[in-house]
Image (tube, grey):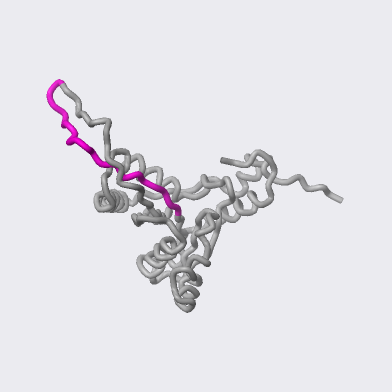
Amino acid sequence: MIPPKASAAFVANMEDVLDTYARPHDPSRPVVCVDEGGKQLIGDVREPLPVRPGSPAKQDGEYARGGTANLFMAFEPLAGWRHVEVTERKTSVDFARFLRVLGDGRYAGAERVVLVCDNLSTHTPAALYEAFEPAEARRLAERFEWHYTPRHGSWLNVAEMELSAVARQCLDRRIPDLGTLRREVAAWEAARNAAVVKVEWHFTTADARVKLKRLYPTIQLQ
């Protein structure tokens, strides 16, 4: 959703993110977008009936609830790489642990990870101090360069697009438990990474100043 009126706070964050996306690919400072989504775990009470000649597959309307799971998504759009971490919760501590997986895993050799995320209260360097001792939290905080999408500007986070893709391509059916969810998501991730599915962002700050002019405050010249 885009705010209906001029908002200096919105355009400041928007231009920051758009300029971040305009940077050329740099493995030493990769731009990585992070977001999170949920999946309700639902199991079958009765075994579904497969497709048979003259009869489509059938699934009972009754189902067993298995709670919900969280999916942390990290996506490097110019490299065509993504990683999905399935967790039981989405607390600050869970987010901090996910960042450590990124910083000390795939991006261990990077000078700094350029991180794009939304402005949830859990998505801050403070989360690292809730999860780790101060020295470790500081070390990890310095591994990331933080950039935030504006409020009502989730469309600016490319990781949200990847969450939509995994929802359509992998999660559009009943999945009964965390173990099954982790296996299915890992298979989707491996296949999509093998295909090196990238995103090249073309909407620029210059475009925004024309097409989204109504979002910019009117300046009174003196």
Image spot of residue 158 (x, y percent): 46, 49
In the rendered image, residue 46 lying in the magenta stretch gets the answer: yes
Residue at 19% in and 34% down: 48
User: Splitting the image into 4 quarters, where does residue 213 fall?
Assistant: top right
Image spot of residue 41 (x, y percent): 31, 45
User: Residue farthest to the bottom?
Assistant: 135
Residue at 43% in and 52% down: 36
Residue 12 vs residue 120, the one in the foreground:
120
User: Splitting the image into 4 quarters, where does residue 161 fall?
Assistant: top left
Image spot of residue 129 (x, y percent): 49, 71
Image spot of residue 142 (x, y percent): 50, 72
Q: Report whether 187 appears left or right of 123.
A: left
Residue 22 vs residue 112, the one in the foreground:
112
User: Residue farthest to the left?
Assistant: 53
Residue 179 drawn above or below residue 98: above
Residue at 27% in and 30% down: 61
Q: Report whether 211 appears left or right of 20.
A: right
- The quarter of the picture where the N terminus appears is top right
Residue segment shown in magenta: 35-54
Is residue 90 among the parts visible in the rendering? yes
Residue at 31% in and 49% down: 192
Residue 197 drawn above or below residue 59: below
Residue 182 drawn above or below residue 55: below
Q: Report whether 82 appears left or right of 151.
A: left
Q: Report whether 85 appears left or right of 210.
A: left
